[in-house]
Amino acid sequence: MPDPPSPATPHPWRRVPAPLRRPYEYWIYLCSLGLFVFGGLFFSAIAFALSLVLPDETGKRLGRRMLSGLFRFFHWALHRWGLVSIDLQDIDDLRELRGAVVAPNHITLFDVVFIVSRLPDAVCIAKASVMRNPVYGGFARLCRYIPNDSPAAMVKAAQAELESGAVLLVFPEGTRTVDPPINRFKGGFALIAKRARAPIHTLYITSNSHALGKRWFILKAPKFPYRYRIERGATFEVAPEQDTKAFLDQLETHFRDALPEDPRTTCRTR
């Protein structure tokens, strides 16, 4: 799969007459949702079947690579349709990370999609409901993603993944942003990083729309062109003697200082 074109690449869509542009935009928006949902249903069914027969190590390696490839294709398709500018260049050098936590803010449903498209070996901490989701629950099982329904089991499993060299993707807010610039942070990931002695690499996500945020009606199309960017942030470590609550407050303050007032409506450009 080739890399998507540069975010600055012009697209013929911009030459469509204004009276026709909105119907075209809405049609493409529905097509993108359809690709995500129905493609997810099909491949997730295959992934679920594989999760029943493959050994854990084989299944998670195959599943994570498959899911990253599918998300990369989705990213490529969005660019080909010409309505979005998705800038992920700053996180390309994270592909070689091992035994580290990646911690972004969380503004849209597709944050996981875009990050995993660039980090094929990432393992996610997921809501228990995701494991039962028909669209991507099969992949969550095959990839051996970590459910958050049991805090003790979650910490133990995540620590083991980090110590084996995996990259742990976790959203400190726990859910998509409701109170910008970020929601209050949840503390589990800091304890995991401390126990595994893993660095925490922060990511700053900004866009120009609330699209697919926490309170967004999914059939409502955003105003196009939709712009989205992920920037590489600072790296932190939790010292063995450091109180995790104090560290969490420090990290949350850092995000509040680093992000714009509302990262859902202020997409930073290069």
Image: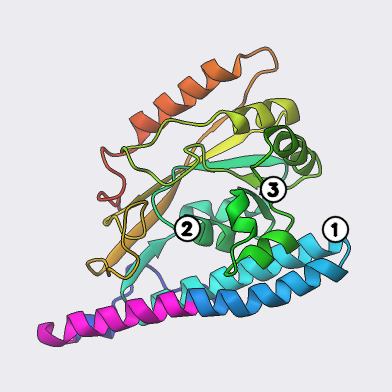
Gap between marks 3 and 1 measured at Cα = 14 Å
Q: Quadrant of residue 239?
A: top right
Q: Is residue 31 left or right of residue 248?
A: left
Closer to the chain start, of discs 3 and 2, is: 2
Q: Residue at x 77, y 74 (%)?
A: 49
What label does residue 57 carry, if any? 1
Residue indicated by mark 3: 146
Mark 3–mark 2 Cα distance, whole angstroms, equals: 27 Å
Q: Position of residue 77 (x, y in %)?
A: 45, 78
Residue type at mark 3 is Ile
Percent position (x, y) of residue 34? 44, 79
Measuring from the top left, give residue 91's x and y in whole percent. Answer: 52, 52
- Residue at the image point whose x is 33% and y is 81% from the top: 28
Judge whether residue 172 can be spotted in this image: yes
* Secondary structure at numbered mark 1: helix
28 drawn magenta: yes
Disc on the earlier residue, 3 or 1: 1
Dot 1, crowdedness within 10 Å: few (<14), some or many (≥20)?
few
Give the residue furthest to the left. 19
Dot 1 amino acid type: Glu
Q: Is residue 36 magenta?
A: no
Q: Residue at x 35, y 50 (%)?
A: 206
Q: Is residue 119 visible?
A: no
Disc 2 marks a residue whose amino acid type is Gln
Q: Circle 2 sits in a helix, a strand or a loop, which is it?
A: helix
Between circles 3 and 2, the one closer to the viewer is 3
The label shown at residue 89 is 2
Q: Residues within 10 Å of mark 2 (few under 14, many from 20)?
A: some
In three-dimensional space, the C-alpha distance between marks 2 and 1, rounded to whole angstroms, equals: 30 Å
